[in-house]
Amino acid sequence: MLQTSNYSLVLSLQFLLLSYDLFVNSFSELLQKTPVIQLVLFIIQDIAVLFNIIIIFLMFFNTFVFQAGLVNLLFHKFKGTIILTAVYFALSISLHVWVMNLRWKNSNSFIWTDGLQMLFVFQRLAAVLYCYFYKRTAVRLGDPHFYQDSLWLRKEFMQVRR
């Protein structure tokens, strides 16, 4: 079971990683003249999203619901967050690769293609949704009914068996 002190530490780490993601999304375009720094920020951002994915799955594995074998129940409750996180991660990596390919050799000129602009908009929209749903999931996983046997869980288990 996730202890209160551990949960607050994990939640703080998740929010720190989300804050870094927000920071890079907000200010990375200001560093287009220095592609090396921008590349390092992008790599750290992608690693932060990957760490958030790992942390959320570790939180899933730690629940009583998962340990009772109701993995489908967890997946059903948090399907939107899981899918959105994967889409956001893919969009972020795609955007970072495209930006670095266009700007690495010629960082003094402003290069902004139509496709890059479209990917940029979709990635930023996905970032807003990712932050909202990820934060909501992280807070919802702090609910004690995920970590102990309860009437709610028994009802869900009986529905799965039918």
Image (cartoon, grey):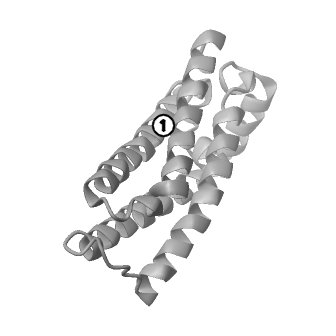
Q: Position of residue 119 (x, y in %)?
A: 47, 76
Foreground residue among 119 and 69 = 119
Q: Residue at x 51, y 55 (%)?
A: 27
Above or below for 108 versus 44: below
Q: Which residue is mark 1?
A: 57
Q: Secondary structure at mark 1?
A: helix
In the displayed orientation, state which residue is furthest to the right. 151
Under mark 1, the amino acid is Phe
Above or below for 50 versus 108: above
Q: Residue at x 65, y 44 (%)?
A: 160
Q: Quadrant of the N terminus?
A: top right
In the displayed orientation, state which residue is furthest to the bottom. 114
In the displayed orientation, state which residue is furthest to the left. 105
Query: Going by the image, does 132 lie left or right of 64?
Result: right
Q: Position of residue 151 (x, y in %)?
A: 80, 25
Query: Going by the image, does 127 lie left or right of 114?
Result: right
Foreground residue among 118 and 78 = 118
Above or below for 151 versus 56: above
Foreground residue among 161 and 144 = 144
Q: Residue at x 49, y 73 (%)?
A: 120
Residue 86 seen in this snapshot: no
Q: Position of residue 105 (x, y in %)?
A: 19, 72
Q: Position of residue 66 (x, y in %)?
A: 55, 31
